[in-house]
Image: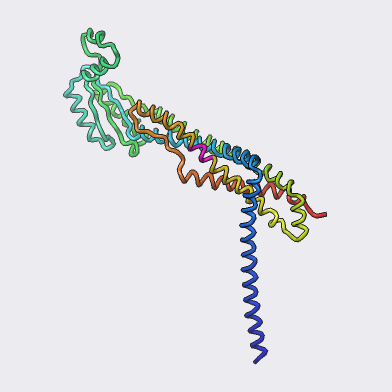
């Protein structure tokens, strides 16, 4: 009976010791991560010039694709504002009566894709042309009004595709009262193509500069490894593993990446704010409420994650490449 109790007590003690051992190892692992992060940050502060230059290079590399992304996003907002309604102009037969034009307007107003119609009479068009062209005295000498009635149709851009608009324009062109139809959608398609190309360029530029960030961080970590060669040899002599030695350098790369991402975000925001006043003045001249939108928290998080990830990868590659060459004799 006492033997079984002793065995049970030994099993309980063994379980407690096992749990204690796992907890101690986990606590030691967490403590080393904390100490490595703090040590890496302190060593960066001990070399302010090198740390500043490296961070600035990373920030510029991250800021360039971010700035292009911001420009494309702002242009997309302008495009969305312009494309909120698509317009089609129907030039009626010269000499057609205003009553016939009004009947056609009522007929087309009921079409499902049309959101708004506006009839510009020949007299109104001539009067507006005289006031804006500066040729009022010359136009007053004409025997008859050379301008036709114009019927402007507006379509909801979100509900109609360019193909539908083209088909509608071909259909309306066949109406007896319509002389010609103008549907200027080509510039919209070109704008979409330019914006899509801008996104692709930003993506390609981001990949190219990400490789540059890896090289910068890798070179910085390589120099740090070489400067601490003797320290690494001592750590390995007392039983330190490669993972133990690698950890402070990984945190160095992480700090550089995070600092570069934050500084890159600040640089882009500062540039956009600097341009904001000029854009606001230009927007006011065109009686538009457009304002430059700076990078927000989502973009900041993306730059921090991207910069930190590149820092970790660059440091891992550099340490893995050079740590194996440093072994105690």
Residue 71's x, y, as percent?
47, 34
Q: Residue furthest left?
A: 99
Q: Is residue 283 visible from the viewing direction of this image?
A: yes
Quarter of the figure that contains the N terminus: bottom right
In this picture, is 223 found above or below 164? Answer: below
Q: How many marks?
A: 0
Left or right of 238? Residue 73 is: left
Residue 228 sits above or below residue 200 on the image: below
Q: Main secondary structure of the magenta part?
A: helix
Q: Is residue 272 above or below residue 249?
A: above
**Residue 211 seen by the camera:** no
Residue depicted at x 48% and y 38%: 269
**Residue under the point 58% across and 47% down:** 308
Rendered position, 145 above or below 25: above
Residue 126: give x, y in percent of width and height: 24, 16
In percent of width and height, residue 173 lies at 29, 25
Where in the figure is residue 259, as x and y percent of width and height? Answer: 57, 44
Q: Quadrant of residue 127?
A: top left
Of residues 115 and 223, which is closer to you in this image? Answer: 223
Q: Which residue occupies 43% across, 30% down?
A: 191
Q: Residue at x 24, y 30 (%)?
A: 117
The magenta span reads 264-269
Give the residue furthest to the bottom.
Answer: 1
């Amino acid at each position: 009976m006492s033997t079984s109790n002793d065995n049970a007590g030994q099993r309980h003690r063994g379980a407690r010791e096992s749990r204690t051992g796992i907890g101690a190892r986990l606590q030691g692992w967490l403590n080393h991560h904390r100490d490595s992060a703090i040590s890496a940050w302190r060593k960066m502060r001990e070399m302010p010039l090198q740390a500043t230059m490296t961070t600035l290079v990373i920030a510029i590399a991250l800021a360039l694709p971010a700035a292009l992304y911001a420009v494309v996003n702002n242009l997309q907002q302008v495009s969305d504002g312009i494309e909120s309604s698509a317009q089609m102009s129907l030039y009626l037969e010269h000499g057609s009566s205003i009553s016939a034009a009004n009947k056609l307007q009522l007929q087309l107003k009921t079409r499902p894709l049309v959101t708004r119609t506006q009839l510009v009479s020949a007299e109104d068009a001539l009067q507006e042309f005289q006031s804006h062209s500066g040729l009022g005295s010359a136009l007053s000498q004409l025997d008859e009004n050379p301008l036709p009635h114009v019927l402007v149709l507006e379509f909801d851009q979100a509900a109609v595709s360019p193909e539908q608009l083209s088909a509608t324009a071909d259909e309306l062109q066949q109406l007896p009262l319509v002389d010609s139809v103008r549907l200027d959608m080509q510039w919209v398609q070109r704008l979409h193509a330019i914006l899509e190309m801008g996104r692709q360029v930003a993506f390609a530029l981001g990949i190219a500069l990400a490789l540059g960030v890896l090289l910068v961080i890798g070179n910085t970590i390589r120099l740090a490894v070489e400067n601490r060669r003797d320290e690494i040899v001592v750590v390995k002599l007392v039983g330190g593993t490669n993972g133990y030695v690698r950890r402070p350098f990984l945190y160095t790369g992480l700090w550089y990446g995070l600092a570069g991402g934050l500084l890159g975000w600040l640089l882009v925001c500062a540039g956009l704010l600097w341009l904001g006043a000029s854009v606001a003045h230009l927007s006011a001249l065109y009686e538009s409420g457009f304002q430059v939108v700076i990078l927000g928290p989502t973009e900041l998080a993306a730059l921090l994650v991207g910069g930190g990830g590149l820092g970790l990868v660059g440091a891992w590659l550099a340490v893995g490449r050079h740590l194996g060459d440093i072994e105690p004799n």
